[in-house]
Image: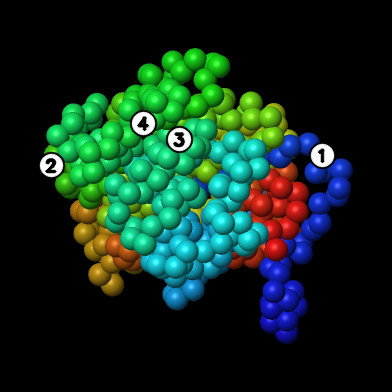
Amino acid sequence: MNRRQLFGATSALALATQLPAAAQEAPASVIFCHIDGFGVNHWNATRMVVAGPDGRLEWDRLPHIAVYSGHMKDGLTGTSHGGATTHAFGVRVQADSFGMDGATPIRSLSGFEGSIAREAMARGRWVGLVNTGAAYEPGTAAFVASTERRNSLAEITRLVAESGVQVHLAGGERWYLPRGVQGRFGEGAREDGLNLIEMLRGRGYTLVFTREELAAVPANTERLWGIFAHDHTFHDRPEEDLARQNLPNYVPTAPTLAEMSEAALRILARAPQGFLLVAEEEGTDNFGNVNNAAGSLEAGARADAAIGVFRRFVAANPNTLMFTTADSDAGGMQVIGPGRGQQLIREGANLPERDRNGAPLDGQRGAGTLAFLSAPDRNGVRHPFAIAWATLTDVNGGILVRGVGRNAEQISQAGLMDNVDVYRLMYRTLFGREAA
């Protein structure tokens, strides 16, 4: 008997548990933390460098777990824009989709003419979007913007700026300003003459551009917009390119995902009817897609710090669901340690540039450099290892959904969650009923 025969048209997650009526009385909130491009293999590597092989990440401490299934309507591997659209609408779409099904407008699973974020705002919830990438990145933008082409960066940025969300923190200043107009980080690129920064100020947003400005936002602020870089808040290039240009992995003046998330929660926590926060670490995906192991590991550590922020918030606010997943696995990263056939992986020694099957091997500064060292294990030993890459693109990978807080037990009860179930869980928690 297959899954559809067993559950009909409704997913296993939708039938896993029915909320008691009493649980619907208090306003509920949802934090969806999308760590783009990160599968179990990436998290294992991050654990080794952050906590050591015997240590535990914040991600490890999320108690409820299911396997994520993320195929698209027309393919087996999720895309960032197609996956985000499915998360936002609860409808499986073509891989090349951004808030639509290809070029066709869609309703969400609930029947609402818009995403779950749009429906949340229409029903009095506050919405926040946080992204270490530019404002046009689909992991957050597809929740409020619909377009036929993912590379319509000026249009997507405009739609995001016009969305009416309570909080938006990301990069991408170049698409807020007209060409020829100098911003805090560089010249604008818009061809339509619109100055979205002035528009946002006119709509009552407090605008901030640096970590220091974000930290100084007054406590009574209710509408906040942060723009922290010319494009992304990171430099998603191979290690060798960054070394030649003397660039760090992340823009030094930009806040981390954890810092942005803390600022967003200070505002959203005051929402009288609850809130939806979608937060994305985009560096975890983009560094993997250029096979930059050091950048990917730094992005993972930053993502884990944000998960810590969310875990502590849920502990103090138990009517909040926090959960995290990815829509694909960036680059097919794998850890290789010393072992049979791997005598060349030694502390203090440069790695070979490729494994015996031709797979690229990364060390601390890229191919052919010193092996990575783990944080100490329980015996104080640091272990050398290499990062091997399968591809420069996204793969299906081994991806988990993990969560804590209100309704998070439904993740474990389901065991397997499709990408459409991300929407179902958010909807059930925010509105206290099934979407369909």
The x and y percentages for residue 271 are 64, 30
Q: Name the residue under label 3.
A: 168
Q: Mark 1 points at which residue?
A: 25
- Residue 24 visible in this rendered orientation of the protein: yes
Q: Mark 4 points at which residue?
A: 199
Q: Is residue 367 left or right of residue 48?
A: left
Task: Name which quarter of the figure residue 423 lies in.
Answer: bottom right
Nearest to the eye among marks 4 and 3: give it: 4
- How far is disc 2 from disc 4 in space, using C-alphas? 39 Å
Q: What residue type is labelled 4?
A: Met
Q: Name the residue under label 2.
A: 244
User: At 38% from the left edge and 52% from the top edge, which residue is drawn?
Assistant: 285
Marks 2,4: beta carbons within 8 A? no
- How far is disc 3 from disc 1 in space, using C-alphas? 28 Å
Q: Is residue 283 left or right of residue 352?
A: right
Query: Which is nearer the eye, 356 or 87?
Result: 87
The x and y percentages for residue 393 are 33, 64
User: At 69% from the left edge and 34% from the top edge, which residue is drawn?
Assistant: 273
Q: Which amino acid does label 3 sit on?
A: His
Instruction: Determine the secondary structure under disc 3.
Output: strand
Q: What residue type is labelled 1?
A: Glu
Task: Name which quarter of the figure residue 7 lies in.
Answer: bottom right
- How far is disc 2 from disc 1 in space, using C-alphas? 58 Å
- Residue farthest to the bottom, as pictured: 1
User: At 57% from the left edge and 25% from the top edge, which residue is drawn?
Assistant: 266
